[in-house]
Image (cartoon, rainbow, N blue to C red):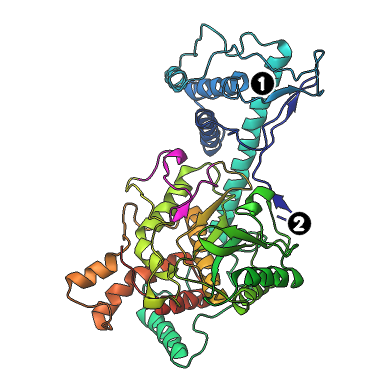
């Protein structure tokens, strides 16, 4: 995405006939792609992929199914019916109103879709007593077919682009690690001890990078964009209203935001995201004093300098990351396509390392080394067998990993990692951004843990309890190797560079295992 590009979270589909009719998806409030239609498109794309894998060879059954699906997509008006999607190109008809297309066609029920699939899979052309475009004028029928074909073509293009990006990601991942924490425990221990020594000297424990901080994971070209939401409260004894005004003014004066005022909740979402560096937005949030929402960021020096400046402005004016604040990281998933396998691998990776992730999510500066709790970031349920459809994934606002923004695919697809605690330490935020980017990238590459494994939140504390080992007791020897094994495996799967693993290890050293 180039400088100044924008994601509006809208998708406009336009198809025009000679008569001037236009089909356009609305900006908000309507799903362009109902699940039944998405399934038909996904199946058509799968057949195309199978043909390509077999050098264009296809059985008669596959050809019949494929062309049957294409015809169904061309003619199925009812999947869009009732949403006011068909209007004249001219603003008014002869009676002064907007002309709507006929709504008498047969509904595409799930039963009808299943019947169609069953008939096609058995090599029998689907038959319907009433054609799906019955009652439509020739112009209306033509625009429906043109629009459906455009949807199929657009999704096919997205699929091809995503497949190319996935292959590129696999090729760019080095075959051999320069250091492996799994195989070389001493390498991990050296980085852990170095972090401990920095803490004892009162130095910055978690390193902060401004040049190539992500090793390509967040690069503008070949990586994925990301964004952060930084919640904060105001210190007791500080005038809250004045503090918010000061923060807003200084953000504007520093060139991070365009205005000095505090906007309404989710106003950035409603306005549309951009990667302009002055598009940070100070918002209201009913649970905290304020939330600072970043623009789309990439791994560039200006992004990290702006993050550090934003945290400094908030903290200097009385802002603090209190126990109840959260930090959310959004990660682009434009290369996930509509492939449920990518989403499954991401969620299985999350499940396999859930306890480690909640430990790393703890704000190191929190009192008692406690995570804020799971009220606003509940652990995601992940079936051991994975998913057969994206619609099965239970992930939404309020869960640890929210994939509601990734289901439609396309350039605006993104996931939200909500489990991180709030922090005003840019080093901590950067490390959590990199963990989020690493998980998203590993799923696309196909790098996953054993499917079905789960390390639930609270697992390590429970193991210590059963072994009669207190939380405060420092482990050594085999006990230390065992309790760090899951962290070491996870870091090896997400990062290749030693500096990235060392940074994550420093955060691990500063945090503690959490209770369920």
**Residue 308 lies in the magenta stretch:** no
- Kindly identify the residue that appears in the image at 61 percent across and 19 percent down: 77
Quarter-of-image position of residue 427? bottom right
Look at mark 2 in the image and give the residue it sits on.
4
- In screen coordinates, is 448 left or right of 55? left
What's the residue at 40%, 39% (across, down)?
A: 388
- Choose mark 2 or mark 1, whichever is in front: 2
**Figure quadrant of residue 1:** bottom right
Q: Nearer the viewer, residue 511 or 94?
A: 94
- Which residue is located at x 47 percent, y 64 percent? 420
Is disc 1 placed on a helix, strand or loop? Answer: helix
Q: Residue furthest bottom?
A: 201
Instruction: Identify the magenta region.
Output: 386-407
Residue 319, percent from left and from top? 57, 73
Residue 223 visible = no
Which residue is found at the position 45% from the left and 76% from the top? 507
Residue highlighted by disc 1: 144
């Amino acid at each position: 995405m180039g400088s100044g590009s924008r994601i509006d979270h809208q998708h406009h589909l336009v198809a025009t006939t000679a008569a001037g009719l236009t089909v356009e998806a609305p900006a908000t409030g309507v799903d362009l792609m109902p699940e039944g239609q998405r399934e038909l498109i996904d199946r058509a794309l799968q057949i195309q992929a199978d043909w390509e894998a077999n050098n264009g060879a296809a059985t008669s059954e596959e050809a019949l199914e494929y062309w049957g699906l294409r015809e169904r997509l061309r003619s199925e008006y009812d999947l869009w019916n009732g949403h006011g999607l068909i209007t004249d190109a001219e603003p008014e008809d002869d009676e002064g109103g907007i002309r709507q297309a006929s709504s008498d066609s047969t509904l595409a029920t799930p039963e009808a879709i299943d019947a169609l699939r069953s008939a096609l899979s058995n090599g029998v052309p689907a038959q319907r007593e009433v054609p799906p475009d019955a009652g439509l004028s020739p112009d209306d029928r033509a625009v429906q077919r043109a629009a459906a074909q455009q949807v199929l073509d657009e999704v096919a293009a997205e699929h091809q682009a995503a497949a190319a990006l996935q292959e590129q990601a696999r090729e760019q991942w080095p075959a051999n690690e320069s250091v492996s924490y799994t195989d070389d425990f001493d390498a991990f221990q050296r980085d852990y001890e170095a972090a401990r020594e920095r803490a004892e000297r009162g130095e910055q424990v978690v390193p902060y990078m401004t040049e190539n901080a992500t090793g390509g994971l967040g690069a503008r070209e070949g990586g994925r964009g990301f964004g952060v939401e930084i919640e904060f409260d105001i210190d007791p004894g500080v005038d809250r209203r004045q503090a918010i005004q000061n923060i807003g003014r200084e953000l504007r004066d520093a060139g991070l935001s365009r205005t000095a005022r505090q906007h309404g909740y989710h106003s950035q979402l409603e306005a549309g995201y951009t990667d302009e560096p002055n598009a940070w937005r100070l918002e209201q949030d009913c649970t905290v004093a304020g939330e600072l929402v970043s623009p789309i960021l990439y791994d560039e020096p200006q992004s990290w300098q702006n993050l550090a400046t934003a945290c400094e402005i908030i903290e200097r004016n009385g802002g603090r990351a209190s126990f109840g604040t959260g930090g959310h990281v959004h990660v682009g998933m434009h290369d996930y396509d509509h492939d449920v396998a990518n989403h499954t691998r991401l969620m299985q990776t999350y499940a396999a390392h859930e306890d480690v992730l909640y430990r790393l999510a703890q704000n190191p500066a929190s009192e008692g080394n406690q995570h804020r709790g799971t009220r606003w970031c509940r652990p995601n349920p992940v079936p051991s067998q994975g998913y057969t459809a994206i619609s099965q994934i239970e992930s939404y606002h309020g869960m640890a990993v929210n994939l509601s923004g990734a289901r439609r695919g396309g350039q605006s697809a993104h996931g939200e990692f909500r489990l991180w605690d709030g922090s005003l330490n840019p080093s901590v935020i950067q490390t959590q951004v990199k963990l989020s980017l690493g998980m998203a990238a590993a799923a696309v590459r196909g790098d996953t843990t054993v499917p079905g494994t789960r390390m639930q939140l609270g697992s390590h504390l429970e193991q210590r309890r059963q072994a009669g080992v207190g939380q405060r007791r420092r482990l050594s020897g085999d006990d230390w190797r065992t309790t760090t094994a899951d962290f070491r495996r996870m870091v090896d799967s997400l990062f290749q560079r030693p500096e990235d693993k060392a940074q994550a290890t420093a955060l691990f050293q500063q945090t503690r295992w959490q209770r369920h």
